[in-house]
Amino acid sequence: MRCTICGNQDLTLLAEELRNSPGRVFHCAECDHGMLEAAAPLDAKAYYATEYRKKFTPSLVAPSSDPAHIFAMHQDSQGNRLKLVRHFSGPGKALLEIGCSAGQFLAHCRSDFECCGLELDDACADHVTRHLGLPVHRQELAALNLPAASFDVVAAFQVLEHVEDPAAFLAEIRRVLRPGGKIILEVPNLHDALRSLWRVPAYEKFYFHEAHRQYFSATSLHRLSRNLGLTVEELQFCQDYNAFNHIFWHFNNAPQQDCRFGLAAPEFPLDASQPVAAQINALCREFDASYKALLAGAGLSSNILLLLSA
Ligand SMILES: [Zn+2]
């Protein structure tokens, strides 16, 4: 087995257990990159159209692969992505989002760009077409053979970690970009605070799973970009789940039942007739904002957001 990024064969074992299935993850110290030991390659279209949403549901209480539920759960947590993409909007600007899910990001972009999605899950793709009126491709990028130089922005959030060959995937994105075009990526951070700071035992197993073939760090993203001649214009650490989700993990050694509380600004259902209730919730929000800023400064946030130019 060789490192996906640099080809190094001197890899060390990083994880021996995955979330829902057997498997091992190896680490390349040269690139600070983790990768799943290659099992049989996935048939991505078949896997993401059927099995994936059943296995990786956002809620443990009410498992759902309902696109309307996915949309509602995530539509308000697109802020960091939108801040980055809005610099590149304008008349006639075309945006492709690979892995557009139920359209929670495209819904915010469709007034600023000519938008197009790519989604392998048919129910999600239907939801985007029906509710947002946008075209959605339903095949893997490589199989589509899109015309060269057809987009100003290609976004792929939480996608690159699923790909067997990230270099080939990014090369294909570069081919469909217009001159001066931008690539915006978001991937989970190998140095997520629940692993590297809180060291929650159950999170270690939760973090690694069969759908994630790659485990990127800032170092491995820089190296991959450099190998392809892509310029890293920005690399931001972004924390999705709030501080109270991390505290929950610490005390319970288990995930919260539903991701909605963890993804929102923290608000507790305190008795509003007590004047101090609003102040305490304000304090929790301030604490959460400061906590997230500290994680970002230390490079320990859950996600890395990357802006590349060709
Ligand atoms: Zn490497």
Image (tube, rainbow, N blue to C red):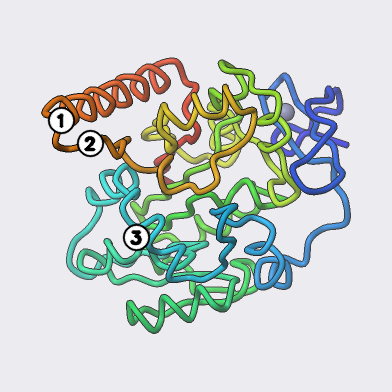
Residue in front for this viewpoint, 128 or 285? 285
Measured from the top left, where is residue 68 in percent x and y? 43, 71
| Cα gap from disc 1 to disc 3, whole angstroms | 52 Å
Give the residue at mark 2. Answer: 271
Q: Is residue 75 left or right of residue 7?
A: left
Give the residue at mark 3. Answer: 152
Q: Is residue 15 above or below residue 79?
A: above
Check contact, mark 2 vs mark 1: CB within 8 A.
yes
The residue under the point 25% across, 53% down is 88
Check contact, mark 1 vs mark 3: CB within 8 A.
no
**Judging from the image, what secondary structure is the residue with disc 3 in?**
strand
Question: Which quarter of the rendered picture does the N terminus lie within?
Answer: top right
The image's mark for residue 2 is none
- Amino acid type indicated by mark 2: Asp
| Cα gap from disc 2 to disc 1, whole angstroms | 6 Å
Q: Is residue 219 left or right of residue 14?
A: left
Residue in front for this viewpoint, 143 or 174? 143
Dividing the picture into quadrants, the one containing residue 256 is top right
Measured from the top left, where is residue 215 in percent x and y? 65, 36
Q: Residues within 10 Å of mark 3 (few under 14, many from 20)?
A: many
| Cα gap from disc 3 to disc 2, whole angstroms | 50 Å
**Judging from the image, what secondary structure is the residue with disc 1 in?**
loop
